Image (tube, rainbow, N blue to C red):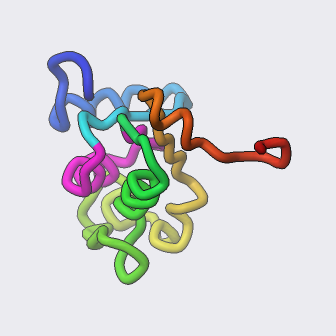
Amino acid sequence: MEHGHGGISDALPCIRALVSTNTAAILRLPESSATWAKKTLDLGPQGIMFPMIDSRKSTQKAVSYYRFLPNSVRGSTHTIVQASDYGINEGYLSNYEEALLIVCQVESKEGVKKIHGGAFNH
């Protein structure tokens, strides 16, 4: 969704097509914002990618966009959205964190310099 002409309304049929072939749908947001994350997550992809993550703070902010209140900023409309099978999936609210892939794309030199991970990082 970040590059090209497609948007939210174009993503839902693509997600449905991918799900019908047992293929995970991972959508790249046009920007790291709560609004884009909420709209995209309601469609029910198996993962989302946040672009231009360049600090610990931007990572924490992006991750907060996918968690529901009171743990974060996302409100729940789970009974009327594709992500929860329109309310049929009763376990959605308790299982969505384990089922969803969150990717934070580091795309700048400054961001790469700030990456810390693993036992061998010095």
Most distant residue in the right direction: 120
- Relative to 103, is 91 above or below? below
Q: Is residue 111 visible?
A: yes
* Residue 46 on the magenta span: yes
- Relative to 24, is 122 above or below? below
**Residue 20, position as x, y percentages in the image:** 46, 30
Where, by quadrant of the figure, is residue 68 drawn?
Answer: bottom left
Most distant residue in the top direction: 4
Using the image as rendered, state which of residue 50 and residue 25 is in the foreground. 50
Q: Which residue is found at the position 37% from the left and 59% from the top?
A: 61
Using the image as rendered, state which of residue 107 and residue 76 is in the foreground. 107
**Residue 22, position as x, y percentages in the image:** 55, 31
Where, by quadrant of the figure, is residue 72 drawn?
Answer: bottom left
Using the image as rendered, state which of residue 98 and residue 79 is in the foreground. 98
Left or right: 20 in relation to 38: right
Left or right: 39 in relation to 121: left
Left or right: 103 in relation to 58: right
Q: Which residue is found at the position 19% from the left and 54% from the top?
A: 35
Q: Which residue is found at the position 15% from the left and 18% from the top?
A: 5
Using the image as rendered, state which of residue 107 and residue 37 is in the foreground. 107
Q: Is residue 19 visible?
A: no
Q: Quadrant of the C terminus?
A: top right
Count every numbered label the image shows and give the total.
0
Q: Which residue is found at the position 29% from the left and 45% from the top?
A: 32
**Residue 42, position as x, y percentages in the image:** 29, 54
**Residue 14, position as x, y percentages in the image:** 32, 27
Which stretch appears magenta? 32-50
Q: Quadrant of the N terminus?
A: top left
Where, by quadrant of the figure, is residue 86 drawn?
Answer: bottom left
